[in-house]
Amino acid sequence: MLTLDLPSTAWLIAGSYAAAVVSALLPWVNGEVMLLAAVPTASARGAVLPLVLAFTLGQMTGKCAMYWLTRTATGRSQRVDAVVERWRERFERYPRWAVVLVFVSAMVGLPPFYAVSIAAGGLRLPFGRFVVAGGTGRFAPFGLLAYEIGRA
């Protein structure tokens, strides 16, 4: 029997969003582990999908902050600028590869999505593409994990 206690469910969702933002900014804080802890409570309240969305949105909020901080950064060294320019030329030649890289990184964590978010800002990957690829890539493992835990 599902019990819908709206205030405590709202706190669960809000807390999960905040925890996901922290996990996006601090790479040693694991969002998947926090999701594992929250799913049983969300399942009892019928709020698994809102929980998954909160984790996805929280992760992307943190990653978007990293993206914009890097994109607007000034005062980089000439060596860093040279490397960024080389990669920018590659991704301008093959723009789909940049989006694929963001998606795969967000989904499986290789290369680390933390580093890819920073690189995407530095390379000036279009923000909309970054958000869609990253958000889809984060939603998939969170959703699958929540589904599997909910089935158990």
Image: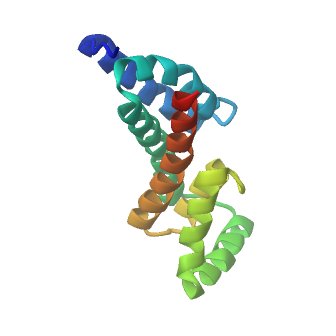
Q: Is there any visible trace of residue 127 in the rendered image? A: yes
Residue 145's place in the image compared with 101, above or below, is: above
Name the residue nearer the viewer: 81 or 49.
Answer: 49
Name the residue nearer the viewer: 56 or 75.
Answer: 56
Q: Please provide percent x and percent y for residue 52.
A: 44, 36
Q: Please provide percent x and percent y for residue 111.
A: 71, 57
Image quadrant where residue 29 sits: top right
Q: Please provide percent x and percent y for residue 33.
A: 63, 28
Residue sitting at the far left: 6
Q: Residue at x 57, y 46 (%)?
A: 141
Q: Residue at x 56, y 61 (%)?
A: 103
Residue 131's place in the image compared with 152, above or below, is: below
Name the residue nearer the viewer: 16 or 1.
Answer: 1
Relative to 118, 67 lies left or right = left
Q: Is there any visible trace of residue 15 in the rendered image? A: no
Residue sitting at the far bottom: 93
Relative to 13, 29 lies left or right = right
Q: Please provide percent x and percent y for residue 139.
A: 48, 47
Q: Residue at x 39, y 39 (%)?
A: 53
Image quadrant where residue 48 sits: top left
Residue sitting at the far right: 79
Residue 100's place in the image compared with 3, above or below, is: below
Image quadrant where residue 57 sits: top left
Q: Residue at x 50, y 69 (%)?
A: 125
